[in-house]
Image (cartoon, coloured by chain):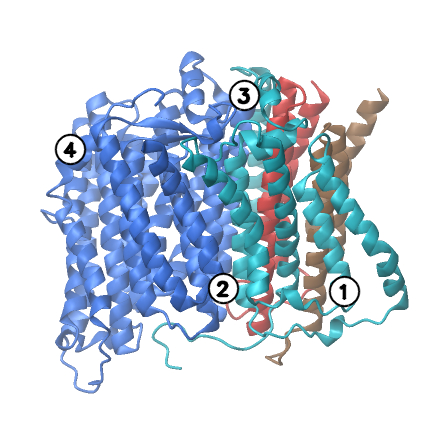
Chain colours: A brown, B red, C blue, D cyan
Amino acid sequence: MTSWLLDGLVVFMLLATAVSVLASRSLFRAVVMFIAFGMLMALAWVRLQAPDIALAEAAIGAGLTGVLLLDAVAHFRRGPDKERGGAS
Amino acid sequence: MSVHLLYAFAGAGVFTIGLFGMVFMVHLLRKLLAFNLMGSGTFLVLVGLAQHRNGVDPVPQALVLTGIVVAIAATALALVLIRRYFHLTGQVTLEPGSRDDEGHS
Amino acid sequence: MMSWLMAGLLFTPLAWAVVSLLVGFRTGRWLSWVGMVLQVGASVALWFAVARESGFYYALGGWQAPLGIELQVDGLALTFVLLTAAVASACGLHAGVYLDPDKPWQRYFWPLFWFLWAGLNAVWLGADLFNLYVGLELITLSAVGLVALGGDAGALRASLRYLLAALVGSMAYLLGVALMYGQFGTLSLAGMSHLAQEYPGLEGAGLAMALMMTGLALKTALFPLHGWLPPAHGIARSPVSALLSALVVKASFFIAARLWLELGPNLGTLALAQLAGVLGALAVLWGSWLACLQPQLKQVVAYSSVAQIGYLFLLFPLTWGVTEAVSQQAQQGMTLQVISHALAKAAMFLAAGNLILSTGSNRVSDLAGVSRFLPFSLFSFGLAGVSLMSLPPTGGFAAKWLLLQASLNSGQWWWTLVLLAGGLLSAAYVFRIYRASFVEHSELDQFYHPPRRLEAIPMMLALMSLGLGLVAEPLLSVMALPFGEGG
Amino acid sequence: MRLAAVLVLCAVFAMALVGTVWQIAGQPVGGTLPETVADAMADSGVDHPVTAVLLNFRSYDTLLEIGVLVIAAIAGISMARLPSLEDPELRTHDSLLHALQRWFLPLMWLVAGYLLWAGAVQPGGAFQAGAVLAGTGVLMRLGGMPMNFLQPRLLLRVGLALGFAVFLLVAVVSAAGGDAFLAYPEGMAKPLILLIEIFLTLSIAMVLLSLFVAAPVNDAREPAEGESE
């Protein structure tokens, strides 16, 4: 019974974070939510008895993709390196 | 209904959310996030549905590992392209001429 | 012998991709010529070996399906391997001269080119759904890399649009694979086909197949999902455009066709078949119409691809619920259409590249007067156009003739109207280019003369497309060879 | 308006998809692959089924997948035009980060090595190890390490290609002996898989890292076809 509760919670959180990745207004928040989503995915893989994927998801899915995306967001905030019109 | 099937349904949901983002969002980075959601949803369906019938199944697990690596390759390439595109034009969307800053989608 | 040839066929493109990554553009060009010779040799030898004996399954790593991955080496697959060898070599030779070797990023052309070739072969031979997915991604990423190579903002925009569309398409396909594995417990297409015959009425698998086909249609740029194609094919360097239009879009179509022919009889529905046909017909009309309106030369050719791809989708209604003979006709028509379009379109893009090189402009209106200076390239362009218009004796004519017969014999006469209208419209856009180039216009008298080799390559391709109609019979008999078990 | 249309379409799609999953879950047909895998494990050379599938039964997938990674890296470094990787903004002089690096890096190397070695018998393997290694590299990079080996020169390209090349050579050597492409010679599966995994780990780390570093940098551009320079 408790395991069903746990799985239900994980699934609910997965869907909720997935929605908030798209719904959050700031790009930075969206990426943070995406990383949280990746962590939850890792948890889901553990629950699905797939520790290999859990490791890969934590390292690649959440970790590395997250860093790449955060770096890109920072880059967008800084603006294009040369002045070209009034982009942010 | 097994736990595996529950995750397969969750995967279907996540895929749809990603698809929505891919179609509706304009910001390239958000599209990329949505693509990754689609990928995660697909992987959940793949493992969940297979393990519902087979029990723990190493084959889809291996496929998902392959899929994750392919997905990050695509994501990283897209990011390089997006960043260079932004660098050249100052744009973060594909619509020519429109300038969209990082706030809203 | 056979196993060495197979190993060579799989090994060469991948090995050349690695080696050419380590060297510069010029050395890579020289190496690639050697690689092309090897690859063409292996393809031809295998084709004749299979034509003499019969097709076989090649178990990679010695593991039979469903545990391992098997390649389906039959007449059809090898004909496509051969076609790829011909077209890719032509594009490679052209690119070696056409691209500027002094640009630092051009060195990455060769590795991407060879990876693309490897991916194409993987798809033609693939018989395992997941392996086909990896092959598709190999193709997509290298194609996107080639479009973006050294590109400015416009090229980046086009390649991003292409990348995103292709990624959605392959994800939809992969989701379908996931559902199929859940249904059948195997990834081998042959195994699925057996099971689908044994247990009719699996609705879930039918929907999964529809999903896969939708994803593949997006990757093939079927109307109305074609929006990404013209910018990407129009803005890439001409040899790259030729590769993309001639081969890359065919890969996803090929998978859709394989799925349909193996699983369609049990999992497909009339509605799905007719829908694919209607969209294909609309693509023919809409693509040709837009091709007539494009101000830019390469956009005309790109929209013509959208139209020509439409014909391929007539395969679906013409093979569903018809007699075996009609289905054979439709399949042969589709195959000839793929081959003749690949040859003709590669010729057209390469010739267009030469024209652009010599006039210094991509605009149709700037072609004025070019007929006096570059009749050879213009002539190649026109010959390829004749095949697209499907006049006899071209391959395009043979293809459409077979499709016409299939639609009459199956009582679906409405497709014949599409075939006729498409032919007329393609004549319109080809003549439009011609009319522009014959305008006497004295303002612009400085035309650059591209090297002879650049002009010879499209001509060869155009002649092959023209002659295809004459050798269609023996070619089709090899493709229809009975499939040997094991091997 | 557009939002509503897309939402409705997605809702329809979601219902169809959930229905399909339900249908399929209700009536699976065909054999069970895990049993086949279990039967073949003895011949695979490793004890962990997922590794066996990845690097033996379906090694062709893995080979092509590494190809995809290499393509992404190639396309990535072809975008980075400047030879210099000196990005002043990345040169943080945070003492905490430095301290972290001193203690953390060796640990990360250890973790990567362990993951790689463990892959033969339990969860872990080249991908996870490569990712951890790449993560280490990213940390070093953020810490302002110049990392000259990531400049788009020969060394980087060798590093990118190494894992793939080793895999490919192993694949073709057995084929030269008349066996199938990608078949491991009798009794050699275990050492060969380990060899492939070691080089794959290095290359995977290199690819991921180079994609992180291959940020866009300068204005060198090629005019579109037909556009005058």
User: Of the residues tagged 1 and 3, which is closer to the observer?
Assistant: 1
- Name the residue that disc number 4 marks: C405
* Label 4 – label 3 distance at C-alpha: 39 Å
Q: Residues within 10 Å of mark 4 (few under 14, many from 20)?
A: some
Rounded to the nearest angstrom, the CA distance separating label 1 from label 3 is 45 Å
Q: Which residue is mark 1?
A: D142
In the picture of the structure, the residue carrying the numbered disc 2 is: C157
Q: The disc labelled 4 sits on which kind of residue? A: Gln
Q: Secondary structure at mark 4?
A: helix
Q: Position of residue A58 (x, y in %)?
A: 74, 43
Percent from the top left, x then y, of residue C7?
39, 38
Q: Do the residues at pointers 1 and 3 share their chain?
A: no
C-alpha distance separating marks 3 and 2: 41 Å
- Which chain does the residue under circle 2 lie in? C
Tell me: B62 left or right of A26: left
What is the spatial separation of the Cα atoms under label 4 and label 2, in whole angstroms?
A: 42 Å
Q: CA distance from mark 2 to mark 1?
A: 29 Å
**Can you tell which quarter of the image residue C336 is in?**
top left
Q: Is residue D138 left or right of residue B22?
A: right
Can you say which quadrant of the picture contains the N terminus of chain C? top left
Residue depth check, mark 3 versus mark 2: number of the one nearer the observer: 3
Labels 4, 1: front one: 1
Chain assignment, label 1: D
| Disc 3 target residue | C185
**Which amino acid lies under the numbered mark 1 shown in the image of this protein?**
Leu
